[in-house]
Amino acid sequence: MDRFRTQKIIRQTIDNWPVARSGLSPRVVHCLEEADVKNIGQLRRWDDQQLLNLANFGATSLENVRWFFNWTRRLEAGHGQVTNFRALLREFLNTQEVFVIEQRYGLTDPLFRPQMKRPTLQEIARMRVRVTRERVRQIEESAIATLRSRLARAVAETQEVYWANQILSGGCVVTSAELGGWTDDPNLGGYQPWGSLLLVSETLERIAFRHDYFSVLPAPVLNQVEKQILQLLHASREPVPFEKILASVSDELSFLNGQRPRLVTVLLDHHPEISGTVERRYFLPMVGTPLVIADILRSRQEPVHFHELTRLYNERMQPHSRRGTGYILRVLNLMPEAQRVTPAVYQLKD
């Protein structure tokens, strides 16, 4: 894949932006829609006095329009960027919105990871005086809508492209664990990278989050690759070697050249429906787990306590595929070839 690049925005493009999604304040949008102003090109033809003559359009609304056109002029000149991600939020969101977004995405919490449960609306409401859960929901909704506006996306593009190229250089994907090395990047402005990329993935377009990793590949490509892998594993009656899986999706990922092994490894090691052994053989748990357990029982040639069986099973598995004793016990009780010798000890039937 080629590196991502920012695109200079011409005035004609900006003039075609719909007022409702442009990035102007809700009050300004309402006033302009009442005056039948549908896009930024039409707004550009109105002078200050004409705007102030609109019902409910005051000095604050006029200041918002001036702020908007100041940014569009910078974009047209190729200077429409902010210094870091924190500065971006503070430029486009008010104090309440910044606080709610920081809490919801764990931007200031060094322990937060995308797979963790986010602070609830109710929990955030308790942090503020006389703020209800519903009000927090409204604030979050307003903030996300603002960050998805045409102006915010255009200004955020430099930041987005920077992160997309960082991910691209690492094989088109970066895992949550690997983001630990990004915490001191000045482009974050002191925010932590996990929540920052999660917010980027939900408001912009180049980066997607799935299964505890971020990717710059289009979602249809990832979906097709995952579908083919799952079909291959479902059709197999035994764990499939990594090399065979890699070969099965080479056509779909031909544009990646030397990055294919890295991408496929991340897809396999983070997919919730796929298990992998330390020898990099992969399977669907409903198919492969009984096979691995049977192989362990066969190799021991003696009855095995299910706690010991769990330990031996996990020794063979990659960290993300390790299981607890309850899971192993459920599988044992469903295996027709497994025989319970005592309430906790199993062996293969003769």
Image (cartoon, grey):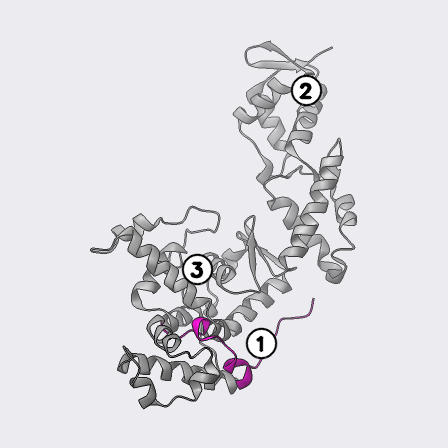
Is residue 28 at least partly visible in the picture?
yes
Quadrant including the C terminus: top right
Query: Which residue is farthest left?
Result: 130
Q: Disc 3 versus disc 2: distance between alpha carbons?
A: 46 Å
Q: Is residue 116 above or below residue 92?
A: above
Disc 3 marks which residue?
192
Q: Disc 2 versus disc 1: distance between alpha carbons?
A: 58 Å
Disc 1 marks which residue?
6
Question: How many badges with numbers are in the image?
Answer: 3
Image coordinates of residue 197 in percent, x first then y, are 50, 60
- First of labels 3, 2 by sequence position: 3
What residue is drawn where x is 38% and y is 74%?
Answer: 29
Disc 2 marks which residue?
297
What residue is drawn where x is 56% and y is 58%?
Answer: 208
Q: Look at the image and give the residue range highlighted in magenta.
A: 1-25
Image coordinates of residue 267 in percent, x first then y, are 64, 49
